[in-house]
Image (cartoon, grey):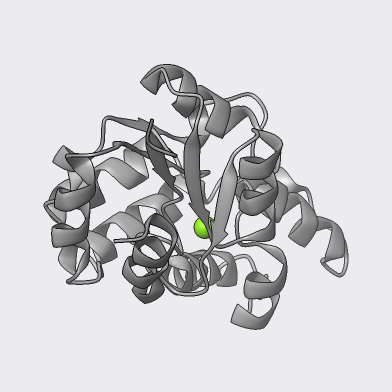
């Protein structure tokens, strides 16, 4: 019996080096309200968590404190800004296509993201990678986000698997995969993913 039945990939920071682009798009929108978002703050506190949680934190730390819903109102504009920028230039690692093609013949594959499916799916399609994944779990599909186990449990349930390997880059995502009962490979950069999988799967 193979050790794993499925491989479950986080999206931002694992399949795609998108976090700097998410940060830049939020920073550009928030600047209009006089709210400053730096990469230093974003990279330390905002990666892997739901956008609403990030904005609640920023609103409460603002001087004077703001109503987080004023910040959340910028979400559609930020989403469109991100989509346009990424569709123009989807920054997937060139090795990903061959890697996923090989894995798709042996494992069920899924993407499990805190971003919405509407953000993730068009980028996978634009990058020619959508076809390799049996299912996508987006942030809008679960009630409890990472670090809760819900997103990974939903993916495993849809695939009908009990033994999965998770790839995650953020503390919240790693905690989510572990809480779901799965082994988690911690990813530092998307470019590391092929070597990490080769090493763990022994091929
Ligand atoms: Mg991530």
Residue drawn at x 42%, y 38% is: 4
Total marks shown come to: 0
Task: Give the x, y percent position of residue 73.
Answer: 57, 45
Q: Which quadrant of the structure image shows residue 25?
A: bottom left
In this picture, residue 14 sits left or right of residue 133:
right
Residue at image coords 35%, 75%: 191
Residue furthest out toward the front: 1
Q: Position of residue 91 (x, y in %)?
A: 25, 70
In the picture shown, does residue 58 fall above or below 17?
Answer: above
| 45 lies left or right of 183 | right
Q: Quadrant of the N terminus?
A: top left
| Viewer-side residue, 171 vs 25 | 171
In depth, the one of 144 and 42 nearer the eye is 144
Residue 118 placement, left or right of 50: left
- Identify which residue, 138 or 203, lies in the foreground: 203
Instruction: Give the residue at x 50% y 47%.
Output: 166
Which quadrant holds the C terminus?
bottom left
At 62% from the left edge and 65% from the top edge, which residue is drawn? Answer: 33
Judge whether 128 appears above or below 149 on screen: below
Residue 159: x percent and y percent? 37, 22
The correct choice, above or below, for 50 with respect to 44 in the image is above
Relative image position of residue 130 (x, y in whole percent): 19, 42
């Amino acid at each position: 019996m193979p050790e794993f039945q499925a491989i479950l990939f986080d999206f931002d920071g694992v399949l795609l080096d998108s976090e700097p682009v998410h940060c830049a798009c939020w920073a550009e929108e928030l600047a209009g309200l006089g709210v400053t978002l730096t990469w230093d703050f974003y990279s330390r506190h905002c990666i892997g968590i739901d956008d609403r949680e990030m904005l609640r934190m920023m609103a409460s730390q603002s001087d004077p404190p703001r109503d987080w819903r004023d910040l959340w109102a910028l979400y559609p504009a930020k989403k469109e800004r991100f989509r346009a920028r990424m569709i123009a230039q989807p920054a997937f690692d060139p090795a990903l296509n061959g890697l996923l093609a090989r894995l798709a013949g042996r494992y069920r594959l899924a993407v499990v993201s805190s971003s919405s499916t509407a953000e993730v799916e068009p980028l996978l399609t634009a990058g020619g990678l959508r076809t390799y994944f049996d299912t996508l779990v987006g942030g809008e599909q679960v009630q409890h986000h990472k670090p809760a186990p819900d997103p990974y449990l939903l993916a495993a349930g849809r695939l009908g698997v009990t033994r999965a390997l998770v790839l995650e880059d953020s503390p919240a995502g790693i905690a989510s995969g572990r809480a779901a009962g799965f082994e988690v490979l911690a990813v530092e950069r998307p470019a590391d993913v092929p070597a990490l999988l080769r090493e763990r799967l022994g091929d």
